[in-house]
Image (spheres, coloured by chain):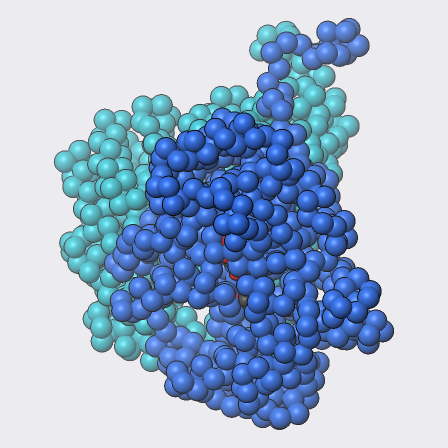
Amino acid sequence: MSGTHGTETTAGPVLGNVAPEATSATGEPGDNGAALEAVGRVARAVMPVTGVIADPTQLRTYECDGLAHYRVTPALVVLPETTQQLAAVVRACSEHGVPFVARGSGTGLSGGALPRADGVLVVTSRMRTIREIRREDQRAVVDPGVINLDVTRAATPHGYYYAPDPSSQQICSIGGNLAENSGGAHCLKYGFTSNHVLGTELVTPQGDVVQLGGLAPDAPGYDLLGTVVGSEGTLGIATTATVRLVRLPQEVRTLLVGFPSTDEAGAATSAIISAGVLPAAIEMMDALAIEAAEAAVHCNYPAGAGAVLVVELDGASAEVEHEYAQVEAFCREHGAFELRLATDPAERALIWKGRKSAFAAVGRISPDYIVQDGVIPRTALPEVLRAIAELSSSSGVRVANVFHAGDGNLHPLVLFDESKPGAGEAAEKVSGAILDLCISHGGAITGEHGVGVDKAAYMPKMFTDDDLDTMQLVRCAFDPDGIANPGKVFPTPRLCGEVPGKRKKAHPLVEAGLADAF
Amino acid sequence: MTTTSSTRLEAARAALTSACGDVTDGSPADAVDGVPVALVARPASTPEVAEVLRAAAAHGLTVVPRGRGTKLSWGQPPEQADLVLDVSRMGAVLDHAAGDLIVETQAGALLTDVQRTVGSAGQRLSLDEAVPGSSIGGTLATNMSGPRRVAVGTARDLLLGVTVVRADGVVAKAGGRVVKNVAGYDLGKLVIGSFGTLVVVTEAVFRLHPVPAARQVVSVLFAAAADAGRLAQQVVHAQLVPAAVEVDWPADGPGAVHVLLEGTEAGVAARSAALVELVGGRSAAGDLPAGWGRLPWADAPGTALKATFALSALPAVLSAGRDAAASAGVGLTLRGSAGAGVVYGALPADADVTAVRAVVTRLRQACTAAGGALVVLDGPAEVKSGVDTWGPVPALDLMRRVKERFDPERRLAPGRFVGGI
Ligand SMILES: Cc1cc2nc3c(=O)[nH]c(=O)nc-3n(C[C@H](O)[C@H](O)[C@H](O)COP(=O)(O)OP(=O)(O)OC[C@H]3O[C@@H](n4cnc5c(N)ncnc54)[C@H](O)[C@@H]3O)c2cc1C
């Protein structure tokens, strides 16, 4: 991914430009050789020779995910083909105390699949079977390595599709989507991965295989599935996913609207949402992002636009008709100077081309850039965009904005040139300041790219120690030894220890006569 | 009550009273599913809930959280209930950010109060009030939802953030106030449907939806389960985007499938005409059918069942229930979401345990075969003790481990939940 994505560096105040080897997230190579040997033996016993990689050159293929700035060579890579094989390796890791990291397609943008130098990387790319398309149940059951778009391809002949559509949908895996709770342009109306994954077969960090949720809703007991989705591989490895299939809409209308500036485009977005219209997508690009997209794919967006909105309406024809009229009126009311409507798939594709290529296109106007991912309440859009512009002009660091406006999920692209001394640091600073803006507006530090290794250090800005400690109680229940993707998500691991309170004898204070039980 | 336990309670009472001020003796009306309650504390804020739970922890009290008490008898009776932690004084709707379509509320708030507040801006929280008088906290704890779940999902799809208090009195938040957020574990989902056994929810943030301008219901009668199944399939595979697809089958008489369409005036008219053409039946504007969204035992409490299944198994589940009830000689009323795969069942209070067990067993087979489950939510004491109410639960061991981490001393509603959790 690094080729199309420039150099994504990170904004983490602690990790910053520290070499990943120097952080506790990646482990030290070499100090658990015997344990790794043992896991390797199990792996070789249960799967074909080509499924176990220990050759240093080959290992290097897996040294990073979409956050290419961080690189760690894993000690061992395994490519299981079945749940049983995968579980056997995880069980061996558990027995020998070896950390493991799951990897789908490696497109993650927060370093979630960054390997451990002292651990095993479990890659799901050989688990790519679509097991069932159950039209009558509006569900599909798929392997974890299945590519997102392939689910839709398999469902479309039945009149259905898989709704969550990250821009990376041609390459990212369902397992990775599940682990990141990934979003996409159409999540405004249809929800995120967590709303569409209804079941999973999970290999726990102890190597047990459990089924959480399934074809039916509301499984009795704790909703462990709900916690596993979005847990970034820290609670185990998903070996199947049962997903919702959504009926293809009767009609789709895609609208490209040019505005003088992001202020007007933001106001139009707010107006649409608060009037009760729920488009499938509302995406925004600012002038710099448009410039990049034009340079890359000649998308021919409205000339002179300070911002464009891509608004897509879908559903029953009778409703779309009406919503279209409303959206058009709101856009004009807020200064739109050009509206283009696409009704057929070819025209629609042209409009989306500019938006979908925007990340990669930024490489045309800047050698390096940071992809940021923060969320703000939608009503704060104009204000926060202005503040970002001020940050940019006061620091001299250019920022392009391409984002999910309807959700308030910002993706500022912070541009810099690594070859200029200090430029990287300046960009890091701006990127971090943008996250602070999101937090101070009551937002979130990540809307869809995840915390991973990249933002673990930011978690205390959003959550108290008690919040993080409570989340980690779940971690301790699933993974008491802390071997599932350690060092990700949480800035400091919680030592799980014995189950607290399961006291076999009296409390030490009671024993010492310093306190009375009653 | 033995002397030691009454001294214990007196010490606890003093601690609780200094924690929140509103502590009373439990009355017979406070009993939790027949289990007597010694004390009732009514804290007025999250910090007070924390104080109460800390005091309860220090004195080893078992605690049953209570919202408005409308579903407190659901699940198994707790093994013990020293203290009811009542959150009804925490009834405020804290903040309605209309422009962001978000509401923040205390757990004791009535669902109807939340709806009134957000309704003034033409919005709604898309959680139907299946049990009248429900609080937000109780709705979350029992994962209650209603007909509209077909279009917008359930609490897990609407809850954005929670504030909870752990058994040890630690206050924690997860999620946030924005519609999109993947920072940290989604503890809100863990709390939904946990029946008060994991933590006490004190505040919640939800996403809202605009109230549609128009609605229309298309109703079709059916005589046999197979017909209900065929109708439901026709509706869900059409491109008419139903807000709800309900099935309603009284113990005596024919059943009906009701399809709710919501949207713009013109849109709803066109869609309901198309639907009538597709499935027949009649279309009515405005009023919802009698009993809409109410649980089938609402008027005559008896044994309350919840059946879940893959969509296409609707006819198998309906007929398993009806056949089993007929051969056991009891009446079974079925009502629920044919579009979501959730049907509730009501057996009369005087049905004997053997008959109930027979129906439960048959229905459970049908549900399990369809990837779902059959749970006895509520019922007379003989039923709860004589029938496997929760049924088999996959991943129970993992659930137990979660419980052990959150409530290692098993003081929150012990025994009420799956597998005796
Ligand atoms: C060009 C581009 C555009 C993108 N656009 C979007 C977008 O629009 N929206 C969005 O949300 N994201 C986007 N992303 C980010 C990324 O594609 C998603 O996070 C995606 O879900 C990652 O999937 P993957 O298979 O590549 O996972 P990986 O990168 O391989 O892994 C991601 C995380 O999931 C864990 N994991 C992987 N498989 C499993 C499993 N089976 N069980 C448990 N844990 C597992 C890993 O340990 C890691 O923590 C984009 C990335 C790129 C490069």
Q: Is residue B11 left or right of residue B417?
A: right
Q: Quadrant of residue B173?
A: top right
For the C terminus of chain A, the image quarter is top right
For the N terminus of chain A, the image quarter is bottom right
Q: Is residue B256 left or right of residue B80?
A: left
Q: Position of residue B386 (x, y in %)?
A: 31, 23
- Depth order, front residue of A485/B54: A485
Q: Position of residue A247 (x, y in %)?
A: 34, 67
* Point 65% across, 49% down: residue: A453
* Point 20% across, 51% down: residue: B315
Q: Quadrant of residue A83?
A: top left
Q: Is residue B372 above or below residue A274?
A: above
* Point 68% across, 88% down: residue: A260
Q: Which chain is cyan?
A: B
- Depth order, front residue of A341/B382: A341
Q: Tally the marks.
A: 0
